[in-house]
Image (cartoon, helix red, strand yellow):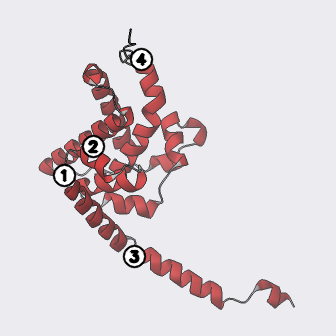
């Protein structure tokens, strides 16, 4: 008598939100670049999960969430390009009292990107941004990104290469600032020597 594998049991709605809301919010924030759009995208992701949970076939649940979040983001970006409306950025999260932050926001703050890096990401075309965020921030492999975005592996490589090239150009000023700071620091006398 062989034991059959147990049938997959869907987690409760509360379990899904509790375990995955921080991760989904972080990805949404990195894709959208502002709190308001990230909250909307997170909510839309969980609505989609709720509606589609019955169609989920066991595999990597996190990968499924990445795919839903990223596809919703790309759909929104395409709609905005057609309508040509640019949302006004909401930077109020930088001024929010830490004790008023919700759990996803606290999770985001722990992994917050530098302002220049986030701005450079925001300036990338949505398809490039999604690929580089999934690779360099979320840590997905090229193969996982191809599955998540529903594109060929070569396209993933191309988008990541182009995104990184644009990020290097956008952040070049920082390299000059760091080099300039190193020159200034080296030119200053050692405080211990001045005291003598």
Q: Nearer the viewer, mark 4 or mark 3?
A: 4
Q: Secondary structure at mark 3?
A: helix
Q: Position of residue 64 (x, y in %)?
A: 32, 35
Q: Nearer the viewer, mark 4 or mark 2?
A: 2
Provide the residue designation for mark 4: 12
Which mark is first along the chain, 2 or 4? 4
Q: How far is the residue under mark 1 from the one under mark 3?
A: 30 Å
Viewer-side residue, 40 vs 121: 121
- Residue 170 appears anywhere in the view: yes
Q: How far is the residue under mark 4 from the one under mark 3?
A: 47 Å
Tell which residue pokes out farthest to the front in this image. Answer: 1
Provide the residue designation for mark 1: 152
Q: Nearer the viewer, mark 1 or mark 3?
A: 1
Query: 10 Å neighbourhood of mark 2: few (<14), some, or many (≥20)?
Result: many
112 w.r.t. 5: above or below: below
Which mark is first along the chain, 4 or 1? 4
Provide the residue designation for mark 2: 148
Numbered label attached to residue 172: 3
């Amino acid at each position: 008598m062989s034991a059959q594998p147990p049938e997959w049991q869907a987690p409760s709605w509360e379990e899904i939100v509790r375990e995955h809301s921080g991760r989904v919010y972080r990805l949404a924030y990195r894709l959208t670049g502002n709190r308001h759009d990230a909250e909307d995208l997170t909510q839309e992701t969980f609505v989609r999960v709720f509606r589609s949970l019955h169609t989920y076939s066991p595999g990597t649940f996190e990968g499924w969430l990445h795919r839903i979040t990223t596809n919703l983001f790309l759909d929104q970006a395409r709609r905005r390009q057609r309508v040509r409306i640019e949302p006004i950025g909401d930077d109020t999260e930088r001024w929010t009292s830490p004790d008023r932050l919700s759990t996803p926001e606290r999770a985001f703050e722990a992994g917050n990107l530098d302002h220049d890096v986030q701005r450079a990401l925001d300036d990338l075309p949505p398809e490039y941004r999604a690929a580089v965020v999934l690779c360099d921030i979320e840590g997905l492999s090229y193969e996982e990104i191809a599955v998540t975005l529903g594109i060929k592996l070569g396209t993933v490589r191309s988008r990541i290469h182009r995104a990184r090239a644009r990020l290097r150009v956008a952040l070049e000023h920082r390299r000059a600032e760091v080099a300039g700071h190193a020159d200034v620091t080296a030119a200053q006398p050692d405080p211990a020597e001045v005291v003598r």
